[in-house]
């Protein structure tokens, strides 16, 4: 009997035919395990007409095997089958990543990543950008994320692994490398936050003599140029909204604009019931879903109730409105009948809609409704009701505040980083009302995820010193930056794109780990080698350190 | 009086003309320091004929200033003048790197680097290579260079910063990403070796189903494609020699082939004087320079004598040969008259040449003459006598030994790394005579510097295990690699190019630091920020470490 074998390489599959008289090859094939490496010499034949497979690139031919050699035999019983992606559990896929990478989906993800990065490079190089590599072993940056430390041979002294090339790219501007880019490895030790990697890749861009408009246009054109042809097209120009608008309408600064329903303000209406008003930051907002998306099951109600517990300064009303009349009656105890009736008119409430109304501290009200908005949409989509639009929805968020109050310490800190320039219109308030000052800073949001951020930077050394003073950052740790600005530094600004997340959304993967060849697991460990691991006494001595706790077995 | 000002940007210079009646601008210009950022609006005029500067791209025009704005003023008295490259001492250049980068030479170096890397990427992508980013936080590799360690949040456990993506690129081959490349950041903590950087960049390449010939051809074609047009052209095919040939003729494995004079063997002649023969590894070699390059001053003699002290098992004769007759007489006490006369004939010695003859332990003899050969050439070139050929001299060194004896421990170790494949012809000697086994390994040498190295790798898991056993490496530290080879791994091989050194030679810079934007200094410190620096108690706690020595003030 003829025997068929499918030979797979990185580019596709081809069917081999072993004749019934070729006993030797038949015997070899009977024993060799799947996933072994074979070398075949033979004759390409047209398949019989009824065997043609139009869906396969090589579906019209087969190869009659003349010689077959087993180049490297695989062992039997591999931990999972290469034909069933996603069936294997992720820890197993990570541990045998070299097998996992053979899945056509993983091949597609990594090959698309390579092509996309190359197209972005091509765009930037054609636009006179210079690819400059900057160090990763650097000094700790004051403020910001937790940085990995690297002990040195100098007793008691450590490098930090850079969070981003921020300072270097600004020094390149000071160095007249006026258009810089780099696909840069960055490091942040954020413990085990899901979907974050301790090392990640960003496309880092900085240019001199530019403004907000210049940077935004550059990124739009670059993404338009580089976006893979075989995927959903993207708009020429991206939507824009201010930070304030995003907070007011979406409850966060990375709005998921695939979802049409926004948060609306009803402070005027609700606050006419003085009993409800608490504090001077009182606000009332709501989000409403019409009949076709109305589904307030016990499960979603409970989820929302438990969400609301994180926002103790916001009071929440969640209602399935059978009829506006019934709702008005029911709620009048709380709102008064008149306020309820006014709300029905103002909100254009319709029968059988679902309403989430929150009032109290404005910040908490908006944050809560922002969360509910997404949770509710996820809930519907889990039921198979698609409420979000398809495709790639890009939005620029502009006019971020320059400062914010740290939740940890209660003091003023940079919303982005201390190098972002204040909006010149707002400099007057720097000292008197710093929270009012807007930055020339922007984020790019794709389908509800921040994928890029940047700003125009401060180029005036005295303004930079003022900002550091306001932030109570010791200028001596950034003396090299202040000095650089004093030596004739051009005005400049830039942006950084988080490539792992961007690719994960572009390729619609379950996790960013599916667009990274060798990711760390959720504990920040390397599942292949088991790193981190103990080091030798010799290394401890060389680096003048001692472990204060023993490794757990 | 009219006043002229030259405005410089990253692309060139343009002459500005301020009219004698424009007192306001004249006053501004009188005060504004050099290197300030100016914005000028004006009218482009043809220069008067006698003022045209043909050497300048903008030499035919000047700009009559209408409006001049000081955008960012530089301070007075910058630490050095941007017009005098190399006059500033390197530590100062490093400390004010952003000023240093403004020198046209530094601009040219970094911009050429960017273009060259892009062309190599272009070549590789066009040849179906996939750019894959691999982790830098990994497990310690057994053997090899000192690796930086990175403490983790897991008590007592550390990452190591990768020396190279070696294991990852092999796993990609196991993962069917059959043609991989990456411009990869690598780390080695070599203390303060001159011209080495703790972090450096290599172009890392690996491919499946290839052989030595395949890799060598790929690199030749890639460099030919990417080499900058405005620099010296390079040959289509590179010279090749075996490791043994290089050691025998140049005294090292990275021969400077710009220098025509080679080491020659005279063991037969010299060993006929039995008195001189010591041990079974006895050899006698020499290198001779003819009249036009003969200069054996006291200074070079002393340098050579002090060199020879590092090779106690080699005896050295250094002579300025006035006439062969005189030399024969003088040396006959040592060699016997007959041996001396034979040597004159065999070596075709001519009057007024310079001779370095060494005998004794073969390894030391060759190493010593290899050093003398280079030192002598450097000495002549410092006197302005050019003995080396100009241009780019590439040579492949092949057939490296698989193993060598560690100078530190006296035991067997890998000459490259434990994944290099032995030459199939020599596998028979793996256990009986391992030092005789050649590897399928190769280095690329440019003008006497190793700029690339690679090998065909072992794909057979049992052969890999045998090699680890011979090396007494604990297989459990490389279990993931052995497992990978057992799951159907294609035969594969690759190469890595050290880009910093390659660019330094290409651009003929004094130091590799001149092709790196922000190098560390010779102590491995960052001259800009002063890193490494002390870290906080909080960080020490987070990473479960304590410093055993205090930082020096």
Image (cartoon, coloured by chain):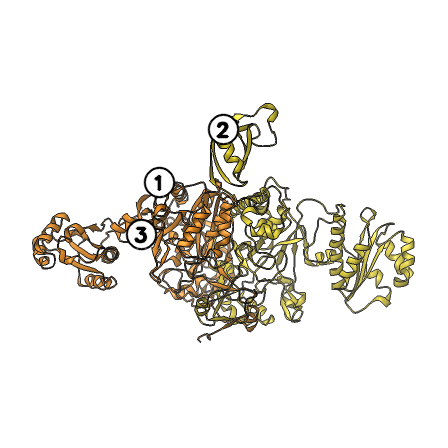
Chain colours: A yellow, B orange
| Figure check: A162 above or below A41 | below
Point out residue B449 in the picture as x, y percentages from the top left corner. Answer: 33, 53
- Residue A22's label in the rendered image is 2
Residues at marks 1 and 2, CA–CA distance in whole angstroms? 46 Å
Nearest the viewer among A238 and B102 is A238
Contact check, label 1 and label 2, Cβ < 8 Å: no
Locate the C terminus of chain A by quadrant: bottom right
Quarter of the image for residue A399 reads bottom right
Classify residue A300 as left or right of residue B368.
right
User: Can the viewer see residue B445?
Assistant: yes
Label 3 resides on the chain identified as B
Q: Which residue is mark 1?
A: B236
Kindly report the distance in space between the C-alpha atoms of the residues bearing marks 3 and 2.
51 Å
Q: Is residue B405 above or below residue B231?
A: below
> Pointer 3: what residue?
B253
Left or right for A531, reference B502? right
Near-viewer residue (B227 or A242): B227
């Amino acid at each position: 009997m003829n025997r068929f074998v499918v030979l797979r390489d990185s580019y596709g599959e081809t069917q081999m035919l072993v004749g019934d008289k070729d006993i030797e090859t038949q015997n070899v094939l009977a024993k060799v395990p799947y996933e072994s490496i074979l070398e075949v010499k033979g004759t390409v034949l047209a398949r019989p007409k009824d065997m043609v497979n139009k869906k396969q690139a090589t579906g019209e031919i087969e190869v009659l095997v003349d010689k077959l050699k087993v180049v490297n035999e695989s062992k039997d019983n591999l931990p999972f089958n290469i034909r069933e992606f996603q069936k294997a559990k992720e820890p197993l896929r990570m541990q045998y990543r070299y097998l996992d990478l053979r899945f056509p989906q993983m091949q597609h993800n990594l090959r698309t990543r390579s092509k996309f990065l190359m197209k972005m490079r091509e765009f930037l190089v054609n636009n006179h950008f210079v690819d400059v590599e900057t160090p990763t072993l650097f000094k700790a940056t004051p403020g910001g994320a937790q940085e990995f430390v690297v002990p040195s041979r100098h007793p008691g002294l450590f490098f930090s692994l850079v969070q981003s090339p921020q300072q270097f790219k600004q020094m390149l501007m000071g160095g007249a490398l006026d258009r810089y880019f780099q696909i840069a490895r960055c490091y942040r030790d954020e413990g085990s936050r899901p979907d974050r990697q301790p090392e990640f890749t960003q496309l880092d861009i900085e240019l001199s003599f530019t403004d907000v408009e210049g940077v935004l246009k550059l990124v739009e054109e670059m993404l338009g140029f580089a976006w893979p042809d075989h995927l959903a097209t993207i708009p020429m120009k991206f939507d824009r909204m201010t930070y304030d608008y995003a907070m007011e309408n979406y409850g966060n600064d990375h709005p998921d604009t695939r979802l049409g329903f926004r948060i609306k303000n009803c402070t005027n209406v609700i606050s006419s019931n003085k009993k409800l008003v608490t504090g001077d930051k009182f606000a009332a907002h709501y989000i409403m879903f019409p009949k076709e998306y109305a589904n307030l099951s016990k499960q979603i109600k409970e989820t929302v109730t438990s969400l609301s517990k994180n926002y103790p300064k916001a009071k929440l009303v969640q209602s399935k409105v059978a009829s506006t009349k019934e709702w008005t009656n029911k709620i009048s105890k709380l709102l008064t009948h008149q306020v309820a009736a006014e709300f029905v008119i103002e909100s254009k409430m319709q029968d059988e809609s679902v309403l989430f109304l929150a009032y109290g501290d404005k910040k908490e009200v908006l944050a809560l409704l922002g969360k509910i908005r997404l949770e509710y949409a996820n809930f519907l989509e889990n039921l198979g009701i698609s409420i979000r639009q398809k495709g790639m929805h890009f939005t620029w968020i502009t006019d971020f505040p320059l400062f914010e109050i740290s939740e940890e310490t209660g003091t003023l800190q940079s919303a982005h980083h201390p190098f972002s320039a204040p909006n010149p219109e707002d400099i007057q308030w720097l000292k008197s009302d710093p929270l009012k000052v807007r930055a020339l800073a922007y984020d790019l949001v794709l389908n509800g995820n921040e994928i890029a951020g940047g700003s125009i930077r401060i180029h005036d050394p005295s303004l930079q010193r003022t900002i550091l003073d306001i932030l109570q950052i010791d200028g001596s740790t950034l003396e090299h930056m202040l000095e650089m600005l004093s030596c004739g530094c051009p005005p400049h600004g830039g942006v950084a794109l988080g490539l792992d997340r961007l690719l994960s959304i572009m390729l619609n993967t379950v996790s960013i780990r599916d667009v990274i060849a060798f990711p760390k697991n959720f504990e920040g460990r390397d599942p292949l080698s088991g790193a981190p691991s103990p080091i030798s006494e010799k290394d401890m001595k060389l680096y003048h350190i001692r472990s204060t706790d023993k490794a757990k077995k």
